[in-house]
Image: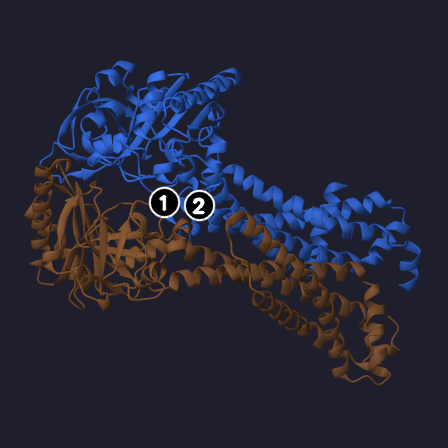
Chain colours: A blue, B brown
Amino acid sequence: MLGYYIDLAIRSLKRSRGLTALMILIIGFGVAASMTSYSVFRAVSGDPIPWKSSKLFVPQIDIWGPKGHSDATSNNEPPDAFDYIDAVALMRDHRGRYQSAMYRVSPSIVPADAHMHPINVGGHAVYSEFFPMLDVPFKFGTGWGADGDARRASVAVISGKLNQKLFGGANSVGKTIDIDGKDYRVVGVLGDWNPKPVFYDVVNTGGFTSGQEDIFLPFTRAIDVGMPNDGNTNCSEIPKGSGFVGLQQSSCVWIAYMVQLDDKAAVSAYKEYLDGYFRDQKAAGRFSWPLNNRLRDLPAWLDAEHVVPSDTKISLMVALGLLIACLVNTAGLLLAKFLRRSGEIGVRRALGAPKAAIYLQFLIEAGVVGLSGGVLGLLLTWLGVLGVGLVLPKEISSLARVDLGLLALTLTVAVVATMLSGLYPTFRASRVQPALQLKTN
Amino acid sequence: MSLHPMIAALRKHKAGVVLIAMQIAVTLAIVCNAIFIIYARIENVRRPTGLDENNLFLVTQQWVGAPSGDDPASVQKLDAMLREDLNALRALPDVESVSPTNSIPLLQSSWNGSAALKPGTDLREGNARTTFYFGDEQWLKTAGLHLIAGRDFTAADVTNMAFRDNSQPAIVIVTKPLADKLFPGGNAVGKVIYLNGDSKPTTIVGEVERLQVPSVSSWASTFVWNSTIAPIRLNGNFSRYMVRAKPGRLEAAMRAVPNALYAANPMRVLDDDSVKSFKDIRAEAYRADIGMAALMGMVCLILLAVTAAGIVGLTSFWVGQRHRQIGVRRALGARKVDILHYFQLENLMIAGAGALAGIALAVGLNRVLMSKFEMQSMPVYYVLAGLAVVMTLGQIAVFVPARRASNVPPVVATRSV
């Protein structure tokens, strides 16, 4: 019976080619527009570390007080990064399972090959626990140990890409590289790891950058050699001292901080600790304002920092609106198409077909239209995802890709949506009175 | 023509009428919001920075193993390296003028603070927020800015300081919007202000008409035109040079830069992005805005096409359905033009009803976008423009089937179907 209905549907669709083509085009465009914007939205709003994001937390301490959030837009939020003094104090207290203070660096590297000009790399100065905390994959070697932090060791972890550039992709563990004129020993080479957004430091990277993270150094070592920070520095007052050392003594914030807390008890214990830390500092006379700390998990943090560009959300909303308009349209056209065949329905009903059979027949017809529209939509989605690079910034558009999931979703959305919009026309068709139709014919 | 029979006829096609009206409503809501977004973005992109953007480019470079710049001796060392670079660039045949700079409009990287009339206010309070540009006596000339009051910097005014030195300049040139904000009475030149909450006074020596801040992000939208230029060479481990090429010699000048700089000092990083024309800086800064406008434009076009197609499709069906009735009307003396008008008027009524709902939907959508995405309130004329667009679209779309209806011959009435 199913095969027969499909055959019927195709025959009927062939009969009015113009109308059928119109419906397929409309569904194709509507689905493709929404799927293309969805692919961009999915790329930028996805969880960068889904298996662990609920265990990663970003603490905030209100070290500035009311003068730091005087303008109306700040919503009484404490600063979204750390000053040096408090970041180091939190690291010293070491209350989480893993934790790392980190700041962005942008040093130069002098290749051993004398013919090559020096190159500039981006990266972060981090603590040893950064690597296990974020499950960073290594191709060769590992991160440095806790003693590397304590000894302020001249070691470095480099990306696979930089390893390719400097060492031709060979195992470079143990080799030496020249960073800002000083020698560092390579202890690890990263596997394929380039998370977007750069969730561990959205404050200094903005989340989505076209830049690559090529180098990771011990935080303590970078401070020792005075490797300056690259990224945002926010101050509530002008630092008293000058230079990078002056920045370290100031209340300016420029350091990102992340901590891993494995369960609820650990989270509340850490919250307790943070509040206690604030109260101690307040008792010591550093702060004169009430407690205003935050401890957000990674998804909440990315949301609070508005990491997903609002343009992406607006585009998705507008594209969904377009899809709805297309479906309303399809419903209208299907209605016209089905009711035009009242005579045929009347004959079928008079010959004993139950309402359910009429339902099935016309829903299948809607489904066939949806499927054809979906196939066209697949093609257009594929073109659309290729084409977003033309209109969207590179750091966003390069993340959108077509995969099996997206293709399956496109087809499903097309078929289900078309059948939904076919529901009412089908309902109307099934209510055709056989007697009336036969008479007028 | 009386509307009564038309409304009675529409009652027979409730579902179709509702569907068309719904579609018109959704289309109107999306189209006028999309057009509003497009206009806002285009307006953003089209505002002039104040620079003379032709023949202008920027060089960004980083020295390898440069001194820290944290002690006076190393600051002087860095300054010597900076001046060496300036000399090398100024010696190039295709270069007209060069100034060191910390940033330039639309570059996104910026140095912001506040200006106040009283000493020692909080850094974040002040009377006005401002961005800072640091350069030498050629900065204004290279940028192509013209003074509207006061004087330009002279070579004697220019000093140098470490990148992270926090002292304030003795003299500055400010933009007119900043000057007017600080001194609404005018005549800012010669007046004293206090920068970044410092207690050291700074004198305004000149005023320029317009100079945009480097950031195009929304957080900087409250002080887009508040710029302060200080006669200071900043010394850090990296440097930027704003370069004006001789007319028509932009590409030649840009090509000559890397070799000239490597010849002056090979221990530096220059990569693909190091030498950038202002045109590219502008394109990069506004890429997202232009992309969004293009995207919204495409959505509008698809939506309008889809809606028009839907109206054509459904009206054609109705014409087919009423074939006989049309024949009867024609036989009873209705002219072709009466039939044509009938369908046009019918569409006008349906589209009008849909548009009424659409106006509410459009305003609602705008409210949602405002509350969630810092969007502005949409002026009424966008809704009116959207209204005109969908009503016209409806009329155009209905014309084809309506004309077919008007061509139904009266003799149809005499045939039995």
Residue B385 drawn above or below residue A185: below
Q: Residue at x 58, y 55 (%)?
A: B366
Dot label at residue A161: none
The residue sitting at the front extreme is: B118
Q: Amino acid at mark 1?
A: Arg
Q: Residue at x 77, y 67 (%)?
A: B318
Residue B70 drawn above or below residue B144: above
Dot label at residue B124: 1
Taking the image as shown, residue A109 lies to the left or right of residue A203, namely: left
Q: Amino acid at mark 2?
A: Asp
Is residue B109 visible in the rendered image? The answer is: no
Return the x and y of residue A36 as percentages of the image width and height.
Answer: 51, 48
Query: Where does label 2 land, which residue?
Result: A71
Q: Secondary structure at mark 1?
A: loop
Q: Which quarter of the rendering shows the N terminus of chain B?
A: bottom right
Q: Are marks 2 and 1 in contact (CB under 8 Å)?
A: yes
Taking the image as shown, residue B150 lies to the left or right of residue B122, namely: left
> In the rendered structure, the residue with mark 2 lies on which chain?
A
